[in-house]
Amino acid sequence: MHSDINVDGEETKPSRKKPIYPINPDLRNYLIKYGREVALPVHYEVLQRFNYTIPLKDKNGKDAYWETVSYDMREWQYLREELVKVYAILKTEGDFSFVTQLDVERIDFCAFGNSQPFRIRIINKYNDNRDYYYIKKADANRVYGLELEHLLSPDRITYFTNKQTLIEEHIPGIPGDEFIKNYLHHPETNQVRFAKEFVKFNERCFMRLLGDMRSYNFVVDITPDIENTQYVIRAIDFDQQSYEGRKNIYLPQFFKDNYPMVEVVSKCLNKESIVQYQAEEKTKVVFRMASALNRMKELIDIMCHDAISPPEKITNLAAELAEHFKQKRFLRAKTMGQIVKIQLKQILLTKLKMVPKTKVRFDD
């Protein structure tokens, strides 16, 4: 972890409300080129025509920040049919041959998030198996975040856009706040392995400047292994991709919600191990960039010319990163995309020898 962590310090907090930034023509063309922009049978605005909502409780009877929405019968029948088709587009590239065995069991709405998402619960009528997906307002920061997640993280992610609508697959796992409460200190939890994964997740977020990874914005996937258990942390919220103006927003270790995880890292890992795991993650990111170099360069070039954050946040983040890395080139950045480019280029310069015979570069 970064050495300036202080679990007793001031809590890191992102902006209370982030504006929606539109998808510009260059980003739209990128999405079309790589199959992310598709025709959808229903859009976000249609889902807003609900009559009333009922607060949703979690399994322990506490508020879940979601509300189940209700529509008039004609609207509900229409939505059930069209939302099953959207699910088919998301899961099988538009193969509608199985839609008769699926139905929409429930639609939930969350006014709490920046994108004000709708969560669609799909049920298989023959075996009662359930799955989810999300319909949200399309936002440039979120799209950049999803695309960088797809290219640079250990996991691929499926999402599609259509005009001002974004649909995302459900990312399975135990919500981070629930993991802290019920699993982190459980006797069967391998805290050393989890600590290793948290260090790597922390590094991944910082490398690509994904912010606001408080515990409820990521999930923990637990996988039994031959000798014990493996843990993978996956981000599930991408609104704060390269928006905030403070460095610590991009380091999950600085959020008060995550301090129990940070304490486990401090207990289980020494400084040398932390540095080792950070280096391992940086090396993996370099290999991922090398395997999708042209696509990565296209995305970053578009991002460099896009306005996805206020000028004052850009200036402040550039200054903080310049001080953190002792690199004045951050001060030349005029957009958040340029800051991300400099950030990733630093990794390439330090790890390029790990990718032999591959020309990996981002030109200034």
Image: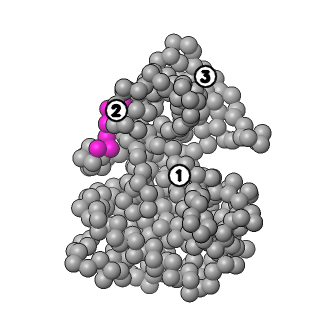
The label number, if any, that marks residue 94 in the structure image = 2
Residue 298 position, x and y percent, is 26, 58
Q: Who's the residue at 29% across and 65% down the image? A: 291
Prevailing SS of the magenta stretch: loop
Dots 2 and 1: beta carbons under 8 Å? no
Q: Who's the residue at 24% across and 47% down the image? A: 33
Q: Which residues are magenta?
A: 35-41
The label number, if any, that marks residue 70 in the structure image = 3
In the rendered image, the residue lying farthest to the front is: 226
Residue 342 versus residue 64 in the image, above or below: below
Query: Dot 1: few (<14), some (14–19), or many (≥20) neighbours within 10 Å?
Result: many
Residue 188 versus residue 320 in the image, above or below: above
Give whichever of discs 2 and 1 has the lower sequence position.
2
* Residue 179 visible from this viewpoint: yes
Marks 2 and 1, Cα distance to the nearest angstrom?
A: 24 Å
Q: In this rendered view, identify the residue nearer to me: 269 or 2.
A: 269
Residue 357 position, x and y percent, is 21, 78
Q: Secondary structure at mark 1?
A: loop
Residue 16 versus residue 170 in the image, above or below: below
Q: Amino acid at mark 1?
A: Ile
Q: Secondary structure at mark 3?
A: strand
Quadrant in the rendering for residue 43 = top left
* Residue designated by label 1: 236
Marks 2 and 3, Cα distance to the nearest angstrom?
A: 27 Å
Q: In this rendered view, identify the residue nearer to me: 344 or 172.
A: 172
Q: In this rendered view, identify the residue nearer to me: 10 or 119.
A: 119
Q: Secondary structure at mark 2?
A: loop
